[in-house]
Amino acid sequence: QVQLVESGGGLVQPGGSLRLSCAGSGTIFRLVVMGWYRQAPGKERELVATISGGRTNYADSMKGRFSISRENGKNTIYLQMNSLKPEDTAVYYCNGLLNGIDYWGKGTLVNVSS
């Protein structure tokens, strides 16, 4: 059973930075696609960024501020978030795709507030 565990969330002031991590376990296979999604209070879950085979994809509102990366040979990804805004406040979820099945972590809360 694939497990994804996020870490690195917390309280940060507007304009600040955070780095989220997601560690995958429970499989010897490489997750084909990994990514980050987020869900703000009262809103639907939305795409933040994905990475697959070295190619990255970002939601328009995150381009230039967020950067997704993957550790070589591992099911571990990171999300570097800069110039954070209050509207970035949300629970951030890690996602991984393997054999047509989506796996999700439990999420980590990012709170951007002064």
Image (tube, rainbow, N blue to C red):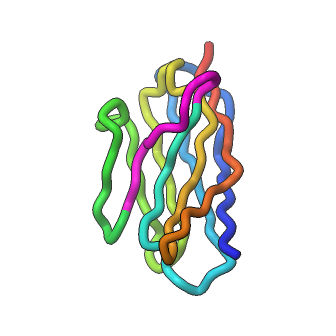
Expressed as whole percent of the image width and height from the top left, the position of residue 105 reads 66, 55
Q: Quadrant of residue 111?
A: top right
- The span picked out in magenta is 40-51
User: Residue at image x 51%, y 34%?
Assistant: 17
Question: Which residue lies most toward the bottom here?
Answer: 28
* Observer-nearest of 45 and 57: 45
Q: Quadrant of residue 40?
A: top right
Q: Taking 78 as reference, is 22 left or right?
A: right
User: Residue at image x 50%, y 49%?
Assistant: 36
Tally of numbered tags: 0
Q: Quadrant of the C terminus?
A: top right
Q: Is residue 93 placed above or below 15 in the rendered structure?
A: below
Q: Taking 89 as reference, is 109 left or right?
A: right
Expressed as whole percent of the image width and height from the top left, the position of residue 41 reads 64, 24
Expressed as whole percent of the image width and height from the top left, the position of residue 51 reads 38, 60
Expressed as whole percent of the image width and height from the top left, the position of residue 60 reads 30, 34
Question: Which residue lies most toward the front here?
Answer: 100
* Observer-nearest of 17 and 105: 105
User: Residue at image x 31%, y 56%?
Assistant: 56
Q: Taking 4 as reference, is 17 left or right?
A: left
Residue 45 among those drawn in magenta: yes
Question: Which residue lies most toward the top here?
Answer: 114
* Observer-nearest of 98 and 62: 98
Q: Quadrant of the N terminus?
A: bottom right
Residue 101 among those drawn in magenta: no
Q: Is residue 41 placed above or below 81 in the rendered structure?
A: above
